[in-house]
Image (cartoon, rainbow, N blue to C red):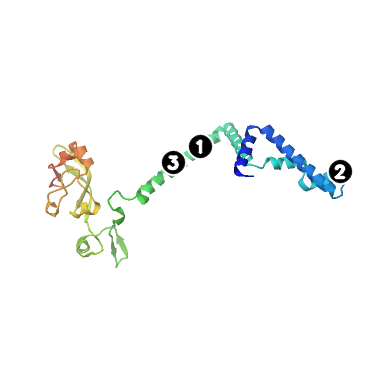
C-alpha cells in the first residue's frame, strides 16, 4: 500500500472508528473463509477446515485485534489514550504532580542557566575583531614546573621586542580602584595599558582619539558607559581630568 493510501485509510479510520472496526471484522472473516476453502480443497471436511484455519491464524477475536493494530492511526490512538490516562492519574495525585512539575522546572532552569554561562564563557566568540587570533601569554617556571597566568618584568619586554610570530603584543594590568572626578568619586576597574592595547583588541573611539606612546604618562581612555554615567555622554568626557591613586590623567 502506498504512503498516500495509508494516510487516507488511517484518516478515515480516525474519523469513523466504528466503520473501521467493521471493515477489520469483514477482512478477518474473508480471510478465514479463504483459509477454510483452501483447507477443504486439501481434502478436509468443513468442520476440520475451520479448525485448521483457526489453528493457523488464531481465533477470530485475536485475528481482529491483530488486524486492528495495523496502521499509523492505531499508534496515534494508543498515544492519545496513554496521554489521557496520564492526565487522569496526575489529577488524582495533585501532591505528586506539583512536586514533579517543580522538580522539572528547577532542573530545566538550572540546566538552562549553566548552558548560558558555558555558552557565553566557553563557546561564544569574544566580542573583539578577529577574536580567534587573540592569545594570552603565560609564564612557565622551569625550576618549579608551575605556570603563572601573566608575563611580567624583563620577560614582557623580551616578548614584545623578539616575538616574530605575533603581529602585535600588548602589556596591561590593573584592578578595581577609586577614580576621583571633578565633583565626585567612582569605584571602577582601572587598567594600565600600552598604546598597542587598542590595536590588539581592535578598539575604535566613540569620541576623541586613541592615545599613543607619547600620551602614556598623562592620557587615559574611558568606556562609553563610564562616560555616560559620569559625564552624560561620550563626547562630554573628552578633555576632562580624573585622578587615580594621586596621578592626574586627561581623557
Q: Earlier in the sequence, mark 3 or mark 2?
A: 2
Q: Quick one: SS at disc 3?
A: helix
Can residue 7 be seen in this snapshot?
yes
Find residue 27 and report its image quarter: top right
Crowding at label 1, few (<14), some or many (≥20) Cα neighbours within 10 Å? Answer: few
Rendered image: mark on residue 101: 1
Q: Quick one: SS at disc 1?
A: helix
Q: In the rendered image, which quarter contains the C terminus? A: top left
Total numbered labels: 3
Can residue 77 be seen in this snapshot?
no
In terms of depth relative to the viewer, which is nearer, 177 or 193?
A: 193
The residue under the point 81% across, 47% down is 38
Q: Nearer the viewer, mark 2 or mark 1?
A: 2
Q: In the rendered image, which quarter contains the N terminus? A: top right
Crowding at label 3, few (<14), some or many (≥20) Cα neighbours within 10 Å? Answer: few
State if disc 3 and disc 1 touch (CB < 8 Å): no
Residue occupied by mark 3: 109
Q: CA distance from mark 2 to mark 1?
A: 60 Å
Residue positioned most to the bottom: 143
Q: Is residue 168 left or right of residue 2?
A: left
In the rendered image, residue 12, in percent from the top left (x then y), is placed at 63, 35
Crowding at label 2, few (<14), some or many (≥20) Cα neighbours within 10 Å? Answer: few
In the rendered image, residue 69, in percent from the top left (x then y), is placed at 67, 41
In the rendered image, residue 57, in percent from the top left (x then y), is placed at 76, 46
Find residue 84 and report its image quarter: top right
In terms of depth relative to the viewer, which is nearer, 151 or 165?
A: 165
In the rendered image, residue 237, in percent from the top left (x then y), is placed at 16, 40
Residue occupied by mark 2: 47
Q: Quick one: SS at disc 2?
A: helix
State if disc 1 and disc 2 touch (CB < 8 Å): no
Amino acid at each position: 500500500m502506498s504512503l498516500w493510501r495509508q494516510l487516507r485509510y488511517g484518516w478515515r479510520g480516525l474519523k469513523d472508528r466504528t466503520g473501521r472496526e467493521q471493515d477489520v471484522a469483514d477482512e478477518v472473516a474473508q480471510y478465514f473463509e479463504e483459509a477454510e476453502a483452501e483447507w477443504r480443497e486439501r481434502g478436509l471436511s468443513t468442520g476440520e477446515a475451520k479448525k485448521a484455519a483457526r489453528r493457523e491464524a488464531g481465533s477470530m477475536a485475536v485475528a481482529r485485534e491483530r488486524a486492528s493494530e495495523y496502521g499509523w492511526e492505531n499508534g496515534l490512538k494508543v498515544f492519545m489514550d496513554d496521554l489521557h490516562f496520564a492526565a487522569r492519574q496526575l489529577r488524582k495525585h495533585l501532591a505528586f504532580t506539583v512536586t514533579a512539575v517543580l522538580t522539572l522546572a528547577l532542573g530545566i532552569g538550572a540546566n538552562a542557566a549553566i548552558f548560558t554561562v558555558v555558552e557565553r564563557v566557553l563557546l561564544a566568540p569574544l566580542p573583539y575583531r578577529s577574536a580567534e587570533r587573540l592569545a594570552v601569554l603565560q609564564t612557565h617556571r622551569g625550576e618549579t614546573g608551575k605556570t603563572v597566568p601573566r608575563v611580567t618584568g624583563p620577560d614582557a619586554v623580551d616578548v614584545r621586542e623578539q616575538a616574530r610570530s605575533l603581529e602585535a603584543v600588548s602589556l596591561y594590568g590593573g584592578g578595581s580602584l577609586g577614580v576621583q572626578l571633578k565633583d565626585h568619586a567612582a569605584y571602577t576597574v582601572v587598567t594600565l595599558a600600552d598604546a598597542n592595547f587598542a590595536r590588539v583588541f581592535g578598539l575604535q573611539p566613540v569620541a576623541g582619539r586613541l592615545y599613543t606612546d607619547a600620551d602614556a604618562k598623562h592620557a587615559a581612555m574611558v568606556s562609553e558607559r563610564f562616560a555616560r554615567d559620569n559625564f552624560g555622554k561620550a563626547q562630554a568626557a573628552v578633555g576632562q581630568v580624573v585622578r587615580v591613586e594621586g596621578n592626574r590623567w586627561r581623557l
